[in-house]
Image: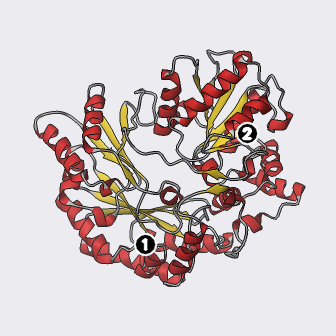
Amino acid sequence: MWFFFPGPESFALSSLGYLWLYKEIDMADSFDIERVYSDTKTTRLMRDRINLIGMSFTFDMDFIAIFHFLERNKYNFKAKDRKESDPLIFAGGPVISSNPKPYAEIFDFMIIGDGEGVNVTVASIIKEGLENNKNKSDILKELSKIEGIYVPGITTKVNKLTKKLTQCIYTPILSTNAFFPNTFILEVERGCSNRCGFCLASYLNLPIRFVDYEEIINTIELGLKHTNKIALLGAQITAHPKFTDICKYIEAKIDNGEEIEMSVSSLRVDSFTPEIVNTLVKAGQKNLTLAIEAGSERLRRVINKNLTEEQIYKAIEIAKSCGLHGIKFYGMIGLPTETQEDLEEIVNLSKKIKAKYKGFEISFGFSTFVPKPNTPFQWFGRENEKSLETKANYLRKELHKLGIQISVSSAKWDYYQAVLSRGDEKLTDYIIEVFNQGGKLGAFRKASKTLNINTDYYAIENYQYEKVLPWDTIDIRPGKEFLIEESKRLINR
C-alpha cells in the first residue's frame, strides 16, 4: 500500500492525522505500507506491487498534487478508466468528509469522518478480497456495507464516522525534516462547542470530545522521553475541563529544571487566563494568535463569536503581565451582513489598543469568507472579487498608518476554493481540465470557459434553504434542519 500526502515531506511529517493513520496500518501484521509525498523521488515499493493507495485530502487545492501523483504513476484520473489490475484508490480527510461529490468519479471509495480504526478494517477487507480473487466491483460492494464508507455508484446515504477519543492521538514519528522539527504533537480534544457559523472545523467534528486527563499526561511523558518540544492540538483546547491542570503539570516540570518548549494552536480570547499564558511564556512562546474574526461586536454576534471588546482588552493585559511581546489577531472579511462600519471597527479597535498598550505589538491576518458545506453559512455566497479587494485595500491602508502589519489571503484563490467547496459532480471534468491547463490561477478561468462552467453559481450565488445540496448524501449531526434554524437565527441577530 502507498499512503499519499498531497504536499512535501516536511508538511506530512507535521500532519498528525496523516501520521497516525499511517501508524495504525503499519502496526498491523499483514500490510506493507509506504508513505509517499508530492516531492517523493523514488519509492521502496515498486508501482506494480501496489494493491491499494490511500490519500489524505485536507485542503481544496490538494487535488492538483493528487492529479500530479496519479499522472506520474500512470494511473487514469477517473476510476472507471482504470484497469482491473490497477490498485483501488481511496481518500479521506476534511474535504472529502464535508463534500465528496466533485471527486466521486476520481476515487473508488471514500472515508467520511474520523478514519481511525476503519482504515485498517478497509485494508483488511481489500486484502482478503484480493487473496480470494474477487474483482473490484465485489470488493467495493463489501466496503459499501461499512459505516462511514462512501462508494460512488453504490452508496446513496452515508453516516459520518464520529469516534470516541479513548486514546490520545500523537506524533508517531519525530524528524528534523518536519515543518515543526522534532515536535511531539498530541491531540487533547476534537471539535469546538462555540459553533461559529462559517466554521467547518467546528461542525464537522461535533460533538466536542475530550481525551482523559491521565491519558494526556501519560502521552506527554512518552513524548518527553524523545524530545523537549511539545505541541497541544485541538480546535478549542482551553475548553478541556482539565486544561489548567495540564498547564500546571508542564509548568511544574519547567520549574523543576526541565527544558520544555510547548506551543498550542490558536486560543480563544475569552479563555485567556494568567495560568495558561504563564505556562506558555515559561515554555518559550513569545507571541500568540487570537481569533477575533470580526471587528464589531454586532458582526461577531452574527457569526456566533460572542466576544466583547472588554474581553479583548483583558486578554492583552494578561498577555502583557505575563511577559508576551505581542499578539496576532486572526479575522475574516466578506462575512454575511458585513458593512463598511464593521471594517471601521477593526481600525478603531486597533487605534484603541495602540493608544492603551504602548509598545505592545499587534498584527492582523485576514482571510476572505468561503462558504463551507455542513455549516449554517453554507447557503451564503461570497462577495464579488472587486468588493473584497476594496475592503482588503482599505484595511491595508488604515492599519499601515498605525504601523500594524497585515496579511490578507488572495481573494482570487479563495473564490476558487469556494467553487470547489460547494461543488457537485459537474466539477469533476472541470478540475481535470484545470490540472491539464497547468493548475495555476489562469487555468481555473480557462477551464470554466472551455467547459462552459458558471463558477459564480458555486462561489457567489445565495442558495435557498429548500435547495437540495450535493453533500446531502452525508448524514451528519446536527442535521440540515438544525443548520437551517441556526442560519436564520444568526443572520437576523
Q: Quadrant of residue 298?
A: bottom left
Mark 1 secondary-structure assignment: helix
The numbered mark at residue 401 is 1
- Is 35 in front, or is 326? 35
| Residue type highlighted by circle 1 | Lys
**Disc with the residue nearer the chain's start (2 vs 1):** 2
Give the vertical position of 378 relative to 117 (above or below). below
Q: Mark 2 = which residue?
A: 107
**Residue 142 visible from this viewpoint:** yes
Question: Real-space Cα distance between discs 2 and 1?
Answer: 50 Å
Q: Position of residue 15 (x, y in %)?
A: 48, 38
Identify which residue is drawn at 20% across, 34% down: 259
Q: Position of residue 389 (x, y in %)?
A: 62, 70
Q: Position of residue 1 (x, y in %)?
A: 63, 23
Identify which residue is drawn at 38% across, 55% down: 266
Identify which residue is drawn at 55% across, 30% down: 120
**Residue 39 visible from this viewpoint:** no
